[in-house]
Amino acid sequence: MNLKFSNNGLKNYSYFNRINISKLIVYFLIAIIFYYFMQTYSPLGINLIPYHHERIVNAIRNIFENPQLSLFGYTSYDTVQVVRNHINSGIGSIYVVPLTTYIFPGILYKIIGNFQFLNYASIIDYIFISSTGIIIAEVGCNIISTKKNLDSLFYGALIFLLFLTSPWTYRLMLAPWFEVGFLAFYMLSIYFFIKDLKLLALFFLFLSFLISWIWGFLIISFLIIFSCLSNLYKKSNNFRNKYLPNGLQNKKGSLIYFSVGLLPLIINYISFNFMKFAGIEFSNSSALFRIGINNLQNIYHGGLLGAFQFLSGNRFSLCLDSYDLTQINELKKYMSIFNCSLSLLSQVLLSLFSILGLFLLVRNNPKVKWIFMPITWSLLVYIFIFQQSFAVHLHGHSYIFGLLFAIGLIYLLKYFSEVFKLSIVTSKIIIFPIVIGVVINSIRVCYITGING
């Protein structure tokens, strides 16, 4: 049977392709301009911080020189000799981390034979983080109801711009954490679920939970708790599964999702316990230390406000040491601290606005709840329970908020333009300078970032 296309169909298809190509070009240009600008003007640039470079080297070397850890799916940030002394002689303890994100660098190391490739490792990180931003932008375009292709180009570019320039993203450029890989693959799974490509979506869901079992555990916990509460309140089966991806909101679908989601958690649990049985002692912080209630001497605990300071994109304490205050007079010293604090407070307000936008998005479009509710609940649990850990390791865990910030803020601006019944052109003319102002403030907050990220 011959397939025939009308001239209109071919024109629409060609136009659709031009829009997608245009979006990729815009994303690429934004990324190039931002990276060049930050490398030129940011105090820390955009290259890996030395201490993180050393961690990568140690992690890769331990994969091959201490294969006892690799067999369990882990490696260590400690030096090869420290790990070897512990394994062979039981001396001290070691800090272990999953080797998942070090597999690709490890392959490069074996091919090249040295660590020269790490001089260009930042480029791989830029590509990876930018790709995550593109996925987030495309998911955002799908869920904020951009009816026209030009709208998709406009709002997609703004979402990508806000995510890439946010202080939460910048900190992970300097010292990538496991959240980088987790968010990339988790959002890719959501994108494929939206496109009804379930096998690909489940595959990347598995990878995301394998990279970060903590976030996987929290997301699965949310779904299990919601399902149990639905049973207690005698809600329908459809209600129990409402936070599962589209196409899996039934008994069979929930079984598939939970099986795929729980498997990496089980793998991590078994591997971790096997290491314990093998006599390996960990120097990783205890759960009570991470929560922050192990002792009074834990000076890094700032309570809930300390945990929620991630909304500013940086710690407020950095305003006290971001400048060489000995080189300026008293008036300029206080002026610098004051303006630094204003920048962070501005970021807090913008973050709160983005949360409001996310709330309006979920309220006005309940069909997207399965995308945002599990990850948002997981973030809240992380903040409320692991207060000390979230405050100290703000530059790692808060990376997830960059997703909520970018989509939530753009939706809020779009929502208000519709409330005030602005024309399509007028709304874009008003939204554009607002977003530029947000980007400038975000870059200003990025500049304050300390040497430890």
Image (cartoon, rainbow, N blue to C red):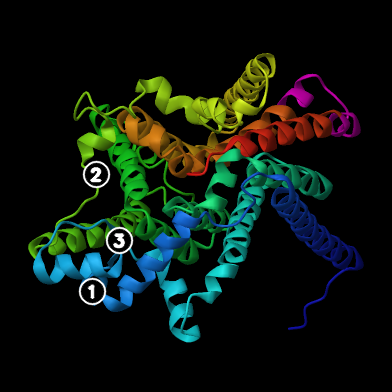
Residue type beneath disc 1: Leu
Front-most of 69 and 149?
A: 69
Residue at 38% across, 49% down: 250
- Give residue 327's position: percent from left, percent from top: 65, 28
Q: Main secondary structure of the magenta part?
A: helix
Whether residue 181 is visible, yes or no, is no
First along the sequence among labels 3 and 1: 1
Residue identifier under label 1: 71
Q: Disc 3 and disc 1: Cα gap in Å?
A: 17 Å
First along the sequence among labels 2 and 3: 3
Residue type beneath disc 3: Asp
Where are the magenta residues, as a range?
A: 415-429
- Give residue 323's position: percent from left, percent from top: 61, 31
Residue identifier under label 3: 78
Whether residue 224 is visible, yes or no, is yes
Residue identifier under label 2: 285
Q: Nearer the viewer, mark 1 or mark 2?
A: 2
